[in-house]
Image (cartoon, grey):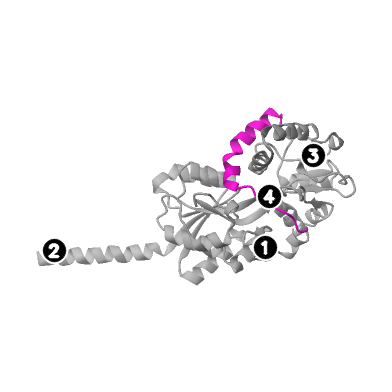
């Protein structure tokens, strides 16, 4: 009997020891390419001793993977782009809430989930981009102006299936109401230079090539082209300028890249630690500069390249409400004939 009790104690100690070893890691699913996030994760490991196991993939594929894996998923932390996807993950019951006074002090309330399921890491602005040679912007002060007849045949923009556009339209609807935005969307469709195709870089290239004089795109795409190793991309981007709209009203649309702790995270506390680590000033500066985005921490300086686009007033609509409105925004665009 004594031997049996002793063996049980040894087994319990062994299990406890193994658990401690296993717990010194965090599993991350990231929609960001490895080169754009791994150096920061390596720094986290050096600072804490917690190993980061990184899986990268497309944003939608990673959410689908989490759904397929269910309660057996090894993921602790999801890092992805656009509040719409973070809301989607929350609504699919793939995330969990946690509170942090540190995060509350750093991340503005409209850039995080109202129930504390996800938090913004960087800001992504979506202004108008134009050709100084071909576009007359003297009366272009609002995103709503894109629906004016004077801009017929001048606009390049991505499809309605693009989540960035869905979030932009959802945000506009929250600001202005469905009827106003429906009329606007119909006007934009009438003014398109071509049927929507390609990504944001393709819209910028369309402006550079004279296929259109105005585009809507996220600034980090333009910044990526300006800093590209490809001289053709740099030359194309140099022909395009940024226009910040609605500066006397609700501001230019912004979204986020963000993070959420997985519902079944085996190492939830370490995932929380990693989010807080990524929001410290040093991490914010590196992360924002490497991804050509804006720090979500308002006390952290923007990169020189992002500052070159000019200061702007950002829209402050709650992004959890924007994400919830994406499906309705898609239906609105469909009614407008936005392919």
| Residue that carries the numbered disc 3 in the rendered image | 146
Q: Which mark is residue 337?
A: none
The answer to whether residue 339 of the structure is visible from this angle is: no
User: Mark 1, mark 3: which one is toward the viewer?
Assistant: 3
Residue matched to label 4: 315
Give residue 127's position: percent from left, percent from top.
Answer: 74, 49
Q: Is residue 334 magenta?
A: yes
The local crowd at label 3, few if under 14, some if 14 to 19, many if 20 or more residues have their Cα within 10 Å, is many
Quadrant location, the C terminus: top right
For mark 2, give the secondary structure.
helix
Q: CA distance from mark 3 to mark 2?
A: 79 Å
Q: Could you say whether the residue bearing mark 4 is in a helix, strand or loop?
A: loop
Q: Nearer the viewer, mark 3 or mark 2?
A: 3
In the rendered image, residue 285, in percent from the top left (x then y), is placed at 64, 65
- Front-lying residue, 148 or 133: 148
Mark 3 or mark 2, earlier in chain: 2
């Amino acid at each position: 009997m004594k031997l049996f009790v002793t063996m049980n104690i040894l087994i319990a100690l062994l299990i406890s020891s193994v658990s401690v070893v296993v717990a010194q890691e965090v599993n991350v699913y990231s929609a960001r390419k490895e080169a754009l996030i791994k150096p920061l994760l390596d720094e986290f490991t050096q600072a804490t001793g917690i190993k980061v196991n990184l899986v990268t993939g497309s944003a939608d594929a990673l959410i689908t993977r989490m759904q397929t894996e269910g309660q057996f998923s090894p993921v602790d932390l999801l890092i992805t782009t656009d509040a719409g996807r973070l809301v989607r993950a929350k609504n699919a019951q793939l995330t969990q809430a946690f509170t942090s006074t540190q995060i509350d002090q750093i991340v503005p309330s409209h850039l995080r989930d109202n129930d504390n399921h996800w938090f913004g890491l960087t800001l992504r602005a979506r202004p108008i981009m134009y050709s100084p040679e071909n576009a007359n912007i003297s009366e272009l002060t609002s995103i709503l102006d894109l629906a004016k007849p004077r801009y017929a045949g001048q606009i390049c923009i991505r499809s309605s299936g693009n989540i960035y556009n869905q979030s932009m339209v959802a945000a506009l609807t929250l600001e202005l109401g469905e009827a106003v935005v429906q009329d606007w969307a119909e006007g934009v469709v009438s003014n398109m230079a071509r049927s929507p195709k390609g990504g944001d870089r393709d819209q910028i290239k369309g402006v550079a090539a004279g296929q259109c004089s105005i585009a809507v795109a996220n600034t980090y795409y333009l910044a990526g082209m300006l800093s590209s190793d490809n001289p053709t991309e740099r030359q194309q981007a140099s022909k395009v300028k940024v226009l910040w709209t609605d500066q006397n009203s609700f501001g230019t649309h912004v979204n986020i890249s963000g993070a959420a702790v997985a519902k079944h995270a085996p190492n939830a506390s370490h995932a929380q630690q990693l989010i807080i680590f990524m929001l410290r000033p040093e991490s914010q500066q590196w992360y924002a500069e490497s991804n050509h985005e804006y720090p979500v921490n308002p006390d952290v300086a923007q990169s020189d390249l992002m500052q070159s686009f000019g200061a702007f007033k950002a829209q402050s609509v709650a992004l959890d409400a924007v994400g919830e409105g994406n499906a309705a925004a898609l239906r609105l665009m469909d009614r407008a004939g936005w392919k």
